[in-house]
């Protein structure tokens, strides 16, 4: 695997590789053509350019959020980075009555989403071209999904690049997460998965409590606020609840001394106890847990 990744990295450095890749993708059509056109006209705040997705990718996760926020005419769900719409159409099966919005930075993806919605004759679906949630209203969503968005396929090399800012910048991630936090209702759910950055490193970390953490099952590099690789660092992907009265946490950023329980101990009054346990002063109900999502 390391040899193959090294070969690909070397190939990308060859003169004319970008032009050749563009022509191949353009000729292939479909998602490949959409990706080629996106690279031809780069857009601000682009994270993952590749539209890789498939239907019902996270069934257990979707059910967990459905049980948390419920369904109904007043519920609003956002799929941020909806790609070609598979996630949105899957969410419709779990949220039959909610209004669901899909945002994606790639105009080709959104055109395909709209065509699919028309063909399926599904109402209460809205697809828009956007690279951020800056135009969304304050406290307007009950749940926001950002699945495999804050990453870049070109960083998944072995060994990974020591810096990520030639593909992704932490500052863009932090600004985008702040907008997602702003348009999420208090008590609403933010779901992050397959990220190269950590929510806990952002200034928005103090707005959230961890409901559930998991191991994504993917070996992926993590990068810090300075865009440098974090060696042997633990991620913080999971389901997060926007709390009513946020308070500063370690300079508005989470520390990771106690791993999974750090969000929980900060926002629910649980202090780490000796032997790795916890002294609970939290409200009744299940605490965060670690699960593996596929």
Image: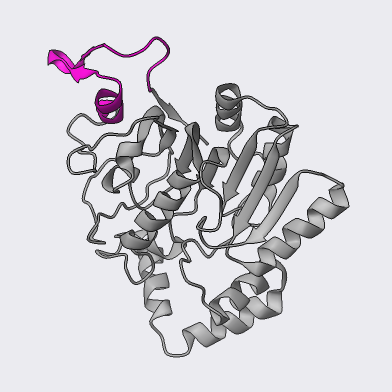
Q: Quadrant of the N terminus?
A: bottom left
Q: Between 134 and 164, which is closer to the camera in this rendering? A: 134
Instruction: Assess whether residue 277 is covered by the magenta stretch.
Output: yes
Among the 4 quarters of the image, the one containing residue 288: top left
Q: Is residue 156 left or right of residue 86?
A: left
Residue at 38% over, 68% down: 167
In this orientation, does residue 125 appear? yes
In the rendering, at what x and y percent does residue 193 appear? 46, 43
Q: Is residue 116 above or below residue 45?
A: above
Among the 4 quarters of the image, the one containing residue 83: bottom right
Q: Is residue 84 above or below residue 272?
A: below
In the rendering, at what x and y percent does residue 144 appear? 54, 41
In the rendering, at what x and y percent does residue 85 appear? 69, 52
Write down the region rendered in magenta.
Answer: 261-288
Q: How many marks?
A: 0
Residue at 76% over, 43% down: 124
Residue at far left of view: 274
Residue at 70% over, 80% down: 27
In the rendering, at what x and y percent does residue 104 appear? 60, 59
Residue at 46% over, 62% down: 47
Q: Is residue 22 above or below residue 156?
A: below
Say how the picture is coloured: one colour
Residue at far bottom of view: 15
In this orientation, does residue 235 appear? no
Q: Between 70 and 167, which is closer to the camera in this rendering? A: 70
Instruction: Assess whether residue 141 is covered by the magenta stretch.
Output: no
């Amino acid at each position: 695997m390391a040899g193959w990744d090294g070969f690909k990295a070397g190939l990308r450095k060859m003169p004319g590789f970008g032009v050749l890749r563009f022509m191949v993708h353009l000729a292939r059509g479909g998602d490949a053509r959409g990706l080629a056109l996106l690279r031809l006209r780069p857009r601000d705040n682009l994270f993952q350019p590749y539209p890789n997705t498939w239907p019902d990718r996270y069934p257990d996760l979707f059910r967990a959020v459905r049980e948390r926020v419920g369904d109904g005419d007043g519920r609003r769900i956002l799929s941020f980075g909806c790609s070609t719409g598979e996630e949105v159409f899957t969410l419709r099966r779990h949220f039959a009555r909610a209004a669901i919005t899909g945002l994606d930075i790639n105009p080709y993806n959104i055109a395909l989403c709209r065509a699919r919605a028309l063909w399926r004759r599904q109402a209460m679906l809205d697809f828009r071209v956007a690279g951020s949630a800056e135009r969304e209203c304050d406290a307007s969503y009950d749940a926001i999904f950002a699945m495999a968005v804050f990453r870049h396929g070109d960083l998944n090399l072995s060994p990974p690049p020591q810096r990520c800012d030639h593909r992704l910048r932490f500052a863009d991630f932090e600004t985008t997460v702040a907008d997602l936090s702003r348009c999420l209702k208090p008590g609403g759910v933010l779901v992050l998965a397959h990220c190269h950055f950590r929510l806990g490193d952002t200034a928005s970390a103090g707005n959230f409590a961890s409901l559930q953490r998991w191991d994504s099952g993917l070996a992926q590099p993590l990068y810090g606020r300075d865009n440098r690789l974090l060696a042997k660092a633990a991620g913080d992907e999971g389901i997060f609840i926007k709390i009513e009265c946020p308070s500063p946490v370690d300079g508005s950023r989470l520390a990771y001394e106690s791993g999974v329980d750090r969000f929980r101990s900060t926002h629910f009054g649980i202090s780490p106890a000796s032997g790795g346990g916890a002294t609970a002063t939290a409200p009744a109900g299940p605490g965060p847990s670690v699960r593996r999502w596929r």
